[in-house]
Amino acid sequence: MAISRTIGLSLLLLMVVSSSGVADDRTAADLLPPSTILYAEIPRPETLLEVLEDHPLRERIESLEGVRDAYEAKQFLQFKAAVTIVEAKLGKTWQNILQSVTEDGIAIGFDAGTQGAVLLIKARDEETAPELLDTIIELARAAAKDAGNSDPVKSTEYRGITAYQIAQAKVATLGRWLFVTNNPESGKAILDAYLDKPDKTLANNPQFQTARSNELDSLTAWGYADIEAIRKAGVAKGLFSGKTDNPVVELLVGGVLDTLQHTPYVTASLNLDQQTTRLELATPHQSEWTTEAREYYFGPEGTGRAPAPIKVSNQLLSLSTYRDVSTMWLRAGDLFKDNIVDQFAQAESVLATLFSGKDFGEEILGEVHPDFQLVVVRQTYEDDVPQPAIKIPAFAAVFRLKDPETIRPEFRRTYQSLIGFLNITGSMNGQPQLDLDIEKEDEYQVISATYLVEKDASPGGLKIHYNFSPSIAFAGEHFVVSSTTALAKEIAIAVADANKLSTDVNSAIDLDVSAVSDILADNRTQLVAQNMLSEGHSKEEAEQSIGDLLELLATAKNASIQLEARDGTLRASLEIDYVAD
Amino acid sequence: MTTAAIDPSWAWKPFRPSKQQPWNRARAAHLLRRAGFGATSQELDAAVEQDPDEIVGALVSPNLDAKFEQESEAFAATILASGNPKQLSAWWSYVMLRTPHPLLEKTTLFWHGHFATSAAKVEDSTTMYNQNRLFRQFALGDFGKLTHAISRDPAMLIYLDSVTNRKAHPNENFAREVMELFCLGEGNYSEKDIQELARCFTGWEIRRGKFRFNRFQHDTETKSILGRSGEMPEGESIDIVLDQPAAPQFIVRKLLRYFMFDEPFASDELVEPLANELREHQWDISHVVGRILTSQLFYSEHVIGRKVRSPVDLVIGMLRTLEGSTNSYQLGDDLNQLGQGLFYPPNVKGWDGGRAWINSSTLLGRANVIGRIVRDEKTRFGGGKLDEYFTRLDAESASAIVDKLVELILAVEPAQAVKGQLVEVINAEGDRSDRIAAAIHALSTIPEFQIM
């Protein structure tokens, strides 16, 4: 039974990994029906195998305790035994077998017509795939016989071609093709297409032709989803409803939800090499698809652009985006369900009190330009100063004021009231108190509040509060709300010096992975303790787990996400840069 | 019903292994179950090679493992940084699972139930942890000193609404509990004694989480408590309470209930000899606990299988005996669900214990918790899966596994038919570890699993 599973596994592995020969230039899309709604392909598996072989992540992943354990697990050892037998039978190394079997690509598709998934692998020649299949079948039968089980492989003929069933998978070879499906009807459709060469295939589908990348050969993998068909089928209704009841999700992806209600398809392109991984999702986009309520997201006619990201020291993350939050606040009634709108109304009431009776959405948020930034940095601590036991990164939001001279006193007064309020409620609960301070320079002003350190505070063990010194800063048109004074001041200086540039994207997120690693290292003791409690590990095991996590993070350098709506296309891209060995 | 039928002179004689009562794995398991949270197969191998007195000697006077203590302190300090008292339940569950000093930990739990204080009211994790350290410091030490220390303990005073205590309006809460629940028990004091004792604690305050003596609010007039009069400066009143003959009897009776049997109620005659010894040994708890654990009575039918397992005994016991480790947060929640939330006793009386642990809903809940834990993907036995663990113990066949489970976990042998059903569960189709887990789950539903 276990051997059968192992053989099934090796088949699946084959499906994920790589051959040429005879004159059959058809692609997997030529064999799949036009009703295929999900499609993905790896055009050059050999290249992918080479990248994976030398990838900096590989060694790190293989050194992880969990992975080392998996390599020693019974199932993996059974798989290795099966691989050895296959290698001996075919007279090639496993690497060579994978390369020759998958040389001309791997593709997977899901057909809405037959409701079946099909995996198509194109080999180098017409011999390798049948040889491999025969060997696997032989192995499965031998294993079943040894275990006293009945023949696990069933065979059937369709139009002169023999197909086999191993567990739930139906497998057949067609010339250079090896295909696997979970549905007999899908299998028949592939066989018919192979034999009949029909006019209507996925490859001939006009929408698919439009979507298909011209640079397919340069990509590691490419995928396509027929969103229109999926939408009509009523799958994932929530995703296509155009609504979310979470204001944070709305702020992040609200505009995308409008596009998903209209777009015909989405494509995904993956590029992978030793230095970088880049994934790009793209979909057709028209500014008319954006509802009036969501104009806050892309701006008028989709012209909203994120400001140039602020750069400060020890930066962990920056988010720069175009969002007209004032309009979003005022449009809450159109965007959210009643219970969320009620919460907005309650918040409005509280904030109006704080802002001297002013309308928060119109008179406060309306005073800032429709863009903002978030900056997160790693905090550093002086050796001779007590440090909080849990070290949290500092973070700040940066806005641009429309009329700084008028609104500045309003914000300053509100901040002072808030600190006073926090001190009163804090003292009622035995919490430390905040001490106000103002620093004025020619180009900026920082108003800060710092927690007074208790006399008997133990060094290295301060409460979590001591991560914060809530501050605001004004520099020209910029208004900074920061969790620490140091960050507020650094941003104030940076924006005062910077040119007022904007990007050509809607939103951009940059993450410095090494800073993430540093923050985790700062909190290593905490992480180890939490790991001991949550995983039941001993201290040594927990140290190993956290060490593995830090090691893994050390392979990545930066990660960035961008969202842009231009030239009739909405693109979201993720790029990860790795540290070279 | 009392233990009047038990002859105290027989009961408190030291247990000496004999042909009729040999020192074997079953008796060693009984000792280590009651004096801790159960023994692993390896620990039983070692225990049967030792003299029972020698084992108890090491348990009551633990040679503290400095590395473990240091790591435990650092671990706790890290947990405290989160400021969340709920994490303390997870921390203590973890400590109980791994401590090299199980009797010390079990006695710490005893004092937590005796001087019950709940984080639900105190809210501050550091304050609760400091009290826990206090219990551990005196767990097997001087009860008098512990009582003096607890009277100034911020967690206790916050819990009993005694953060302020002015001479004009003495707060009687702490004084009442000292008499009723901590030292004497009902019927051994009068309301007047409580009122007078409360006057002694005036000026005892908690400010910013710390004890402070406010001399301006302390009543310096003469008080009269339990037949003695005087100004009774700082702490003297507690000594007067501890001097009462009822005090050592009250404590010994509670210790007997905790370490020996839930029922019957220990008679005065049975309690008296140990109460006298407790007084003679200046309130040294380790002496009395040592006497209990080395007595003839402890290894008799009056004691073996006569205690209902508390949730801690049930869950921590099962895991420790099988060298288990798991998600301690979930473990803390499980104990809470079963009615023994660590740092969260239900009221100032602590946990009732005994039959109160069992009713129709908790019985199902107890089995469900055991079933969940043994199937939890984070639960490991001896660092691996159950089948690997039992293979390591040379218990390959289903019947060998069942015998091992019975030996390690149960105090009373179940019916042969029950063992046969467990063998069938293990021999059924499917992953072997899953089947052993199912057998442990099934075992947890039988009455014998509920007692120890």
Image (cartoon, rainbow, N blue to C red):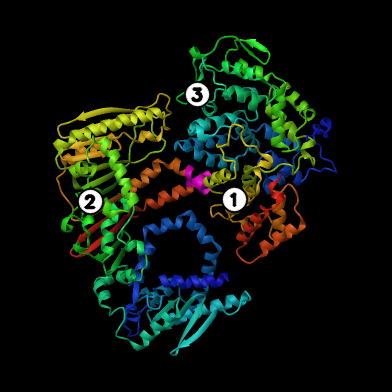
Tell me how far mark 2 sits from mark 1, CA to CA.
49 Å
The answer to whether residue B249 is magenta is no
The kind of residue on which mark 2 rests is: Arg
Q: Secondary structure at mark 2?
A: loop
Of badges 2 and 3, the one in the foreground is 3
Q: Position of residue A299 (x, y in %)?
A: 18, 55
**Badge 2 vs badge 3, beta-carbon distance below 8 Å:** no
Query: Which circle's residue, 3 or 1, is located before the other in the chain?
Result: 3
Secondary structure of the residue carrying numbered label 1: helix
User: What stretch of residues is rendered in magenta?
Assistant: A529-543
Q: Chain of mark 3?
A: B
Q: Position of residue B297 (x, y in %)?
A: 79, 36
Nearest to the observer: residue A122 or residue B209? B209
Q: Which mark is residue A323?
A: 2
Q: Which residue is mark 1?
A: B369
Question: Which tag is nearer the camera, tag 3 or tag 1?
Answer: 3
Residue at the (20%, 44%) spot, across then down: A362
Q: Position of residue A105 (x, y in %)?
A: 35, 74
* Horizontal side of residue A443 vs B198, given as left or right: left
Image quarter where the N terminus of chain B lies is top right
- The image's mark for residue A190 is none
Q: CA distance from mark 2 to mark 3?
A: 52 Å
User: Residue at coordinates 43% horizontally, 90% vertically from top-left?
Assistant: A159
| A41 left or right, relative to B383 | left
Report the amino acid beneath label 1: Val
Residue where numbered disc 3 is placed: B163
